[in-house]
Structures are given as structure tokens and as C-alpha cells.
Image (cartoon, rainbow, N blue to C red):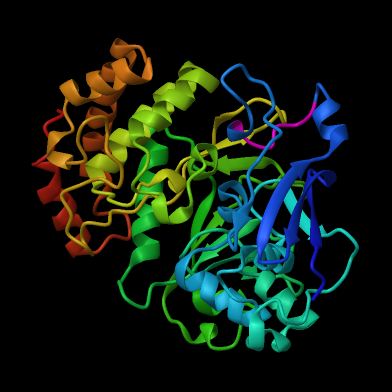
Amino acid sequence: MADVSILEVLLYGEPIGTLTRVAGDRTFFAFNEAYIADENRPVLGLGFKDDLGTLITNFRPYQTRVMPFFSNLLPEGYMRTYLAEGVGVNPEREFFLLWALGADLPGAITIRSADGEALPPDAGDAAANRYDDDRREKALRFSLAGVQLKFSAVNESTGGLTIPAKGIGGSWIVKLPSREFEGVPENEYSMMTLARLIGMDVPAIELVDVSAIGNLPEGIAALNGQALAIERFDRLADGSAVHIEDFAQIFGLYPADKYKKASSMNVAAVIAAEGNEADIVEFIRRLTFNTLIGNADMHVKNWSVIYPDRRTAVLAPAYDFVSTIPYIPDEEAGLKYSRTKRFDEFSEDELAHLAARALLPEKLVLDTARETVATFHEHWKREKRNLPLSAEVVRAVEFHLKTIPLK
């Protein structure tokens, strides 16, 4: 293998920088001079500017892994292992994973070899000799960041969903049923539907029979039940991309630290600085709602911003709203609110503390939280029997609601 390999980083299809790998699996990121000089450049990420809003252009090297911003574009856990095996890349060597999967990443970023060369034959050590174009295209069907088995699909005019033959360009995300927990797609569909009824920004969703999904990879088609289809908010109707970034990227955290090194207060502070009053209201609604349903998995990667005009960050639409407590009983949220992670300490006092530290208007925060609680109970009472929720999920949420001090 050559001692130096270079990947181009493109934003909206235009090269803006490079990722360079040198001997010893050390990688460096650098912006292109043209991007640096462009006063109207599209924003790659909030973490690339300093306290004065100036573009940061000097970055330290990283060993084996790439810098956190790019690491968060890749899948995690089992999904990473699954994809890495599919393309013959060592899952820990993130530079080569980006090389293999870079044509279909979240947001408006694409990554490609600077000179168009195929993946080096020893990119994954002994296992990498399995890599070929067909395996790469199959892997691209599953290249979206995250751990759940999900892939990009095309919604057909005749109804149903089909996995793109070449794996690129799908405008829907399909989440398959869990092998471990029953009814997860139905749970998420129900919670996202409730969130929309309460007034939150939720993309189009629908439940589809797994049997109605065309072109599923071998072995996966054997799954039974329903899958959740979600329209991608980082893709427009014409197929063009809208840039997004999650808060792990913003905070410069690796996915392994998504529960540990930030809090909901930190997320709120960024939204207060970058967004508007509507974003603050939406944030408090979502924070309150996910507390009420017992979602213990709202980590920093489940919050994102989107750039509709390529330069201004606003809170992205909601995603990954699931009541986790019916499957894994938990008394704590995924992130600390301000001083505590405990659901039963989510009170007006805790929200006032969060508002003060994040520089949010306290009255707006408390009024929004109270309204969300009242509206939630109104819709929950009416919809819990109409939504596709199991009796176990309903019982778990009902019991949990009694422990929340915010009324």
C-alpha cells in the first residue's frame, strides 16, 4: 500500500477539503484554500468555528480513527462490523470505511478517493481481499450513521419500498424489526405520531410490512413483522442533499462518548446561540416529551441541526423517539438535564436551572414544558388505544408518568 492516501471531502458536491492518511494509520484533515477564502462558504459544522465565529483551519492528527466529526458519519456497533465485513475493511480503520461508504453519508457530505483509485488491497488486513465493487454497492444500502439495522430506500409510485439496486440515492430510511425486542417499529411510529400531534416537527413516517420491501439483502428478508419507514429530511424531492450534523459532531465527541461528555443543557446552549425562539420551544417540547414517554436513549447523536440555506443552523426535525422503558427498565435519561439524569427529578426547578445555565428565557422554558405536559396527557388519553402499541408498552408508560414531578 502507498504510504500516503488522500480522500476528497465534498460538500454539496464541491470539494472543500482533504483527509490524508500517512504511514502508521495517522490521518489529517485540511480545508482547501478556496474554501477558506470564500466568505460565503457553506457551513461544514459548528465545531469548525471559534468563539468569534472565525473558521478553524488547524487540526491535530488522529491515529487509526479519523477526527470525531467524520467518525460520526459512520455506523456504530454491530452495523459497523456488518458493513466493514461486507466491504472487507477493518472496522477500526475509519479512513478506509469512509473511502468505501463515502458516496452515501448523512447530510450533504460525500467522500471519494482524490485520484479515483479503488480501495487499497490491504485496507482491512487479511480480510480485505474480499472487497469488490458489488460488495461496496451492497454496503452503501446500509451506510447511514447509527446502530440499528436501517437502510436507504426509494418509495415507489406503486406503493411499498424498494432498496436501490446501487445503494445510493434513497429518500427514505427503513428501520427493520428488532430480533431482540418486540414491536420497536410500532413503538417508534406511535411516539413520533404523538409528537406530531403535540406540535413537533416530525418527518413523514409509515409502517410497512417487511414482505412489501423489495430488494432486501439475503437473510434479512426472512424477518417478519413491520418496519418503520421515515422520509429523509436531509434529501429534497429532487434528490439533492441538505446538510445536517448531529451534536456529537458539534461537540467533537466520538460516538462512544455520546452519553458521557455533554448534557441537555449543553445542547440547549448551542440552540440558544445559533437558533431562534422557535428552536428553543421545539427543544423544550422534545426534551419534555421524551421524558414523559421514558426514552432513556436520547443521547447527543439523537439531536441534530440542519442548514436549509447552507449557512444558518436550525434544529433539525425529530427522530428516534422510542419509549425504551418497556424493554429496558431505566430511571435515568440518556443525558443529564442540568444537574440530574433522573426522570423523577425532571421538575420546574431543574428546568429553571437548565434555562439559567444555557441562557434561555426561563418563562418561555417553563411555559413550554407545562403546555407540553398538558397536551401530551390530552393526546395520550385519546390515542393510546388507537396507536399500534402493545399493552405492555402502555402499562410501562402509564406507570412511568406517575413518577414525573412536572405537571
Q: Where is residue 343, by image quadrant?
A: top left
Q: Quadrant of the N terminus?
A: bottom right
Residue 276, image x, y percentages: 51, 18
Q: Which stretch is magenta?
A: 41-46
Q: Position of residue 48 (x, y in %)?
A: 63, 33
**In magenta stretch: residue 30:** no
Question: 226 left or right of 349?
Answer: right
Residue at the right extreme, as displayed? 115
Relative depth, front residue between 85 and 145: 85
Dividing the image into 4 quarters, which one contains the C terminus?
Answer: top left
Any part of residue 66 in sight? no
Residue 212 spot, x, y in % from top left: 56, 75
- The residue nearer to you, when weighing 220 against 118, is 118
The number of numbered discs placed on residues in the rendered structure image is 0
Relative to 151, is 214 above or below?
below
The residue sitting at 18% across, 63% down in the picture is: 391
Q: Is residue 133 above or below residue 360?
A: below
* 403 with respect to 69 (left or right): left
Residue depicted at 42% across the width and 51% down the height: 320
Q: Is residue 238 above or below residue 157?
A: above
Q: Nearer the viewer, residue 142 or 397?
A: 142
Residue 267 on image: x %, y %: 42, 32
